[in-house]
Image (cartoon, rainbow, N blue to C red):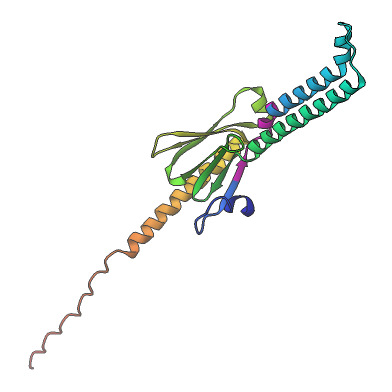
């Protein structure tokens, strides 16, 4: 946890990581499915190319088949690189919850990313949304955090176990605000003026007998 997060973000003294929320593995499914389909199509075309051309009485030489084989290999390698990029983008997009803030990192491509740091003091409400049978079966959804200062809603799609995450976020926000209020009261008490000491009363002179 320290190697992955503290190197990227300068956590303030006393700030600790509570949870790292990566995206659910279902976020990988569309890219992987597209990659598998493309690879299957490439090799289906290569394997059946001779039969397709035989209809037109075209016969390919052995050298052409070998060249087409290496072309199919090259296309397969490019598709695998594309799937690897999809995984890189997936692995670099996550939320980090600390005892002071929420760090949201979104990777759009190999060279484009966006990072936002939201103080827990600015978070007004955290909720989640689940849509459809897949999100219910595989237990993932969209986290939403609304803020007080800019009245915006920050979302994190494909969040795993969103109900548990919302509970953890709300507990962190409540604990942070309670600690801040306790610290403010302590500071007020420490800076409160000390009342002046009341002098002892002067004893009255004794009357002669």
Q: Residue furthest bottom?
A: 209
Instruction: Count the numbered circles shown.
Output: 0
Tell me: 177 left or right of 143.
left
**Relative vertical location of residue 25 with respect to residue 101 in this rendering, above or below:** above
Q: Is residue 36 above or below residue 203?
A: above
Q: Quadrant of residue 91?
A: top right
Q: Residue 106 at what x, y percent from top left?
A: 56, 37
The C terminus lies in which quarter of the figure? bottom left
The location of residue 84, given as percent across then percent down, is 71, 35
Residue reaching furthest to the left: 208
Q: Residue at x 43, y 46 (%)?
A: 121
The residue closer to the viewer here, 109 or 96, is 109
Q: Position of residue 39 (x, y in %)?
A: 78, 25
Q: Could you say which quadrant of the image residue 21 lies in?
A: top right
What's drawn in magenta, residue-wise?
20-30
Name the residue at 92% across, 21% down.
62
**Residue occupying image coordinates x 24% and y 69%:** 195
Is 159 displayed left or right of 52 in the figure?
A: left
Pick out the residue farthest to the right.
Answer: 62
Q: Residue at x 59, y 50 (%)?
A: 5
Q: Nearer the viewer, residue 102 or 180?
A: 102
Q: Position of residue 157 (x, y in %)?
A: 58, 32
Q: Was residue 29 drawn as part of the magenta stretch in this picture? A: yes
Whether 174 is drawn above or below 146: the answer is below
């Amino acid at each position: 946890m320290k190697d992955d997060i503290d190197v990227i973000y300068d956590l303030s003294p006393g700030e600790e990581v509570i949870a790292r929320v990566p995206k659910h593995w279902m976020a990988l499914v569309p890219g992987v499915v597209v990659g598998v389909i493309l690879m299957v199509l490439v090799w289906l075309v290569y394997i059946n190319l001779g039969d397709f051309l035989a209809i037109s009485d075209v016969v390919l030489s052995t050298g052409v088949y070998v060249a087409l084989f290496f072309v199919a290999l090259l296309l397969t390698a490019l598709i695998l690189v594309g799937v690897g990029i999809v995984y890189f983008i997936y692995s670099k997009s996550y939320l980090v919850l600390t005892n002071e803030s929420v760090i949201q990192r979104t990777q759009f491509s190999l060279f484009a990313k966006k990072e936002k740091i939201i103080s827990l003091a600015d978070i007004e409400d955290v909720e989640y949304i689940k849509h459809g049978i897949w999100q219910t079966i595989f237990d993932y959804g969209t986290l939403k955090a609304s803020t007080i200062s800019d009245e915006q809603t920050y979302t994190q799609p494909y969040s795993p176990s969103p109900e548990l995450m919302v509970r953890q976020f709300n507990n962190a926000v409540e604990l942070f605000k309670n600690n801040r209020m306790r610290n403010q009261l302590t500071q007020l008490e420490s800076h409160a003026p000390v009342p002046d000491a009341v002098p002892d009363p002067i004893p009255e002179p004794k009357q002669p007998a």
